[in-house]
Image (cartoon, rainbow, N blue to C red):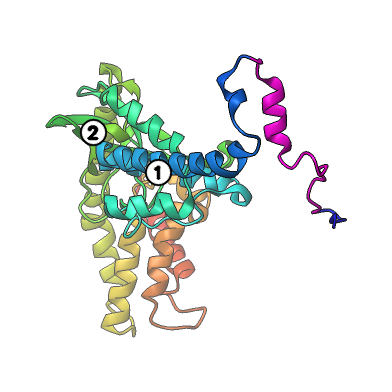
C-alpha cells in the first residue's frame, strides 16, 4: 500500500526496489568490477556495514582529537560553539554549557561531544590551529581575551596589556577599563589609557591567562605610557587636595554644625560618612565649583554612592537629613555657602 500525505515515502516500481543502487549501476562504466555484484547486495549488506565502520572511525578520531588537543583549546572550542548557539537558538548545537561540569575534564568533554552530536570539523580545526603553535606575544602587547565564567566582571571580552611572560604558554595581563555605550550597541570597548582597579584595594587588576586565549590587537607605546602616568598623577593630586579640604575645612565645619544638634551620635556619624563618600567620588571633579552648580547628583557615579547612603539611612521620613537627596543638598550647601573651593 502506498502512503498518501506529506510524509509519504517515495514510490518505487516493483522491479526497482533500490532506486539509488539502480542509478549508481547505470552511471558506472560497463567494465567496472562493481558490475559483477548482485543487485541489492550494496543496499542490503554492504551499505549498513559501511555506516557502522564510518561511525567507528569517527568515534576513534574524536577520541584522538580529545586526547591530543590541550584542555584550554577544547574549552575555547566549546565556548565558541556555545556563543554561536546563543545567536541562533533554533539551530543551536550546545544549548547549555556549564564550566563546572561539561568543561571540568576531558572525560566530560568527550561526553558533551556525544550528547550534543558536535560535528568533528570543529575539533579538527582547533587541533590544526594548535599544531601551528600559540600566538607570538611579548611584553607590552595589547591583547583581547574571553574570560568565560571567571573574573570579577563576569563573563565577556576583556582587554589588557601583557606585563609578564610565564613559562611557555601563559602571560600576566594588566586589565584596562571597558566602556559600554548605546552607540556601540552596548558592546564592550577597551580604554587602554585607564587601568582597571580593584574596588577594595585600588590596585591594578591582573589576570594570568593562557596565550591560546589571547588575540593581539596592538602594542603599547611611549605615548600611551605617558598618558597613563599623567592621569595617575592628576588623580593623586586631586585626591590629596580633596583629603586636605575634607580634614581642614569640611570636617571641622560639620562637627561645629552638629554640636548643638539633637541628632543621635549614630545618625550624625551616618551623615558624616555619607558626606565623605560623596566628596571622594573621584569620577567627578568636585573641586570645580561649576560642577556643584550643574546638579552632579544625576551622574551615575554619584548615584552609586547615594545608594550606599540610602542603605545607611536611619529614618524613613523625607526631611531626615540622612536621606540621600538631603545629604547631598546638605553637603552642597556646605561647599558653596562657606567658600570651601574659593
Residue displayed at 55% across by 43% down: 45
Front residue of 145/199: it is: 145
Determine which of the numbered discs, if any, sits on residue 56 in the image: 1
Q: Helix, strand, or loop for circle 1?
A: helix
**Residue 89 place in picture, x, y as percent:** 59, 51
Q: Helix, strand, or loop for circle 2?
A: helix
Is residue 211 found left or right of 49 in the rendered image?
A: left
User: Is 22 drawn above or below residue 272 in the view shown?
Assistant: above
Residue displayed at 27% across by 70% down: 256
Determine which of the numbered discs, if any, sits on residue 233 in the image: 2
In the image, the segment drawn in magenta is 7-30
Is residue 185 found left or right of 57 in the rendered image?
A: right
Residue displayed at 45% across by 79% down: 320
Q: Confirm whether the magenta stretch covers residue 8.
A: yes
Residue 254 is drawn in which quadrant?
A: bottom left
Determine crowd level at label 1: few under 14, some 14-19, many 20+ residues with C-alpha closer than 10 A: few
Front residue of 11/230: it is: 11
From the image, which quarter does the N terminus lie in?
Answer: bottom right
Front residue of 327/81: it is: 81
Amino acid at each position: 500500500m502506498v502512503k498518501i500525505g506529506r510524509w509519504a515515502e517515495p514510490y518505487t516500481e516493483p522491479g526497482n526496489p533500490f532506486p539509488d543502487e539502480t542509478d549508481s549501476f547505470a552511471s558506472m562504466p560497463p567494465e567496472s568490477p562493481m558490475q559483477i555484484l548482485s543487485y541489492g547486495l550494496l543496499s542490503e549488506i554492504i551499505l549498513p556495514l559501511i555506516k557502522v565502520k564510518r561511525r567507528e572511525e569517527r568515534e576513534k578520531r574524536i577520541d584522538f582529537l580529545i586526547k591530543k588537543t590541550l584542555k584550554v583549546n577544547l574549552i575555547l572550542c566549546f565556548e565558541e560553539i556555545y556563543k554561536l548557539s546563543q545567536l541562533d537558538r533554533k539551530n543551536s548545537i550546545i544549548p547549555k554549557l556549564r564550566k563546572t561540569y561539561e568543561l571540568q575534564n576531558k572525560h566530560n568533554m568527550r561526553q558533551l561531544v556525544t550528547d550534543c552530536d558536535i560535528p568533528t570539523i570543529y575539533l579538527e580545526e582547533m587541533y590544526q590551529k594548535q599544531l601551528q603553535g600559540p600566538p607570538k606575544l611579548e611584553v607590552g602587547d595589547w591583547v583581547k581575551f574571553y574570560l568565560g565564567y571567571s573574573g570579577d566582571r563576569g563573563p565577556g571580552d576583556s582587554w589588557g596589556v601583557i606585563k609578564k611572560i610565564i613559562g611557555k604558554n601563559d602571560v600576566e595581563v594588566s586589565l584596562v577599563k571597558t566602556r559600554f555605550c548605546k552607540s556601540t550597541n552596548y558592546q564592550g570597548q577597551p580604554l587602554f589609557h585607564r587601568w582597571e582597579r580593584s574596588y577594595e584595594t585600588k590596585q591594578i587588576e591582573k589576570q594570568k591567562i593562557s596565550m591560546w586565549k589571547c588575540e593581539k590587537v596592538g602594542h603599547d607605546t611611549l605615548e600611551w605610557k605617558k598618558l597613563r602616568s599623567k592621569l595617575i598623577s592628576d588623580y593623586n593630586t586631586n585626591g590629596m587636595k580633596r583629603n586636605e579640604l575634607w580634614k581642614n575645612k569640611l570636617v571641622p565645619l560639620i562637627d561645629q554644625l552638629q554640636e548643638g544638634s539633637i541628632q543621635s551620635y549614630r545618625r550624625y556619624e551616618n551623615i558624616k560618612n555619607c558626606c565623605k563618600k560623596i566628596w571622594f567620588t573621584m569620577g567627578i571633579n568636585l573641586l570645580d565649583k561649576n560642577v556643584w552648580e550643574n546638579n552632579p547628583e544625576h551622574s551615575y557615579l554619584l548615584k552609586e554612592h547615594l545608594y550606599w547612603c540610602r542603605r545607611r539611612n536611619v529614618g524613613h521620613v523625607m526631611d531626615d537629613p540622612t536621606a540621600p537627596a538631603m545629604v547631598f543638598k546638605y553637603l552642597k550647601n556646605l561647599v558653596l555657602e562657606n567658600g570651601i573651593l574659593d
